[in-house]
Image (tube, rainbow, N blue to C red):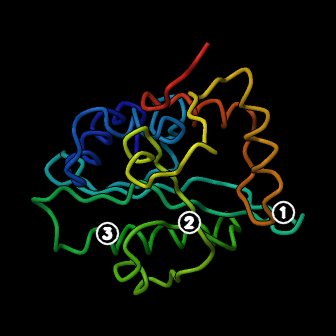
Amino acid sequence: MHPEEYDELMDLAEGAYGFTKQHFFNYYPLGSKRKNIIPGNYFVIKEDGKLVSCVGLVPLEAIVDGSRIKVGGIAGVATHPDYKGRGYMGKLLNYTTEEMKEREIPLSVLGGDTQRYRHFGWETSGRKVLFHLNRRSLKEVNIGKDFTWRSYNEKKDLERIIEIYEKEPLRIKHSREDFERMLERTQIQRSG
């Protein structure tokens, strides 16, 4: 991918997943803002000058019980709906795994449809815990008086979030700036 293709890449991803404009920018600022996209790590297929399929390779470092391991985060796997079924995703995933070998990246992580990616060698492993809390969802589960709702406060909460995360025995290494970017999502309520 070339730097000037950033907008086209974002349009392709949003169109491929059926999301509205700016979806990735709002929900995943760490991985989708222009300044965070390294063009040489995104591999694309063009047809008639139009970007129609892409796969991103994001260099990461995993920490496993204190040991550091180079990891390739597979991101932005997308094909324009009008170009599906032509084998573009497979070609790009195979290219990406070869690129990982050249860069001596022994392990990769890829979220998504297990059935789709197992054919290319990815397996289900690890764990993921994701919480989406809002006042309505908490009311529906009748959580009781032991729970106090308050908004995210960057000054008070960022250090504690980092501290809790760094106690996980299996994690991706993130800088403080990474956490700040992840938590700048527009959907996170903040308090003063």
**Residue picked out by circle 2:** 99
**Residue picked out by circle 1:** 68
Closer to viewer: mark 2 or mark 3 = 3
Q: Say which quarter of the image contains residue 72.
A: bottom right
Sequence-wise, which precedes: disc 1 or disc 2? 1
- SS at badge 3: helix
The mark tally for this picture is 3
151, above or below 95, in the image: above
**Residue picked out by circle 3:** 89
Q: Nearer the viewer, residue 49 or 13?
A: 13
Q: Indicate left or right for 70 with 39 as reference.
A: right
Give the Cα distance between marks 1 and 3. 30 Å
Tell me which amino acid carries mark 2. Answer: Glu
Give the Cα distance between marks 2 and 3. 15 Å
92, above or below 38, in the image: below
Q: Residue at x 24, y 75 (%)?
A: 87
Classify 10 Å Cα crowding around label 3: few (below 14), some (14-19), many (20 and above).
Answer: many
Numbered mark located on residue 139 in the image: none
Q: Nearer the viewer, residue 58 or 125?
A: 125
- SS at badge 2: helix
The location of residue 176, given as percent across then percent down, is 75, 33
Tell me which amino acid carries mark 3. Answer: Met
Quick one: which residue is furthest to the top in this view? 192
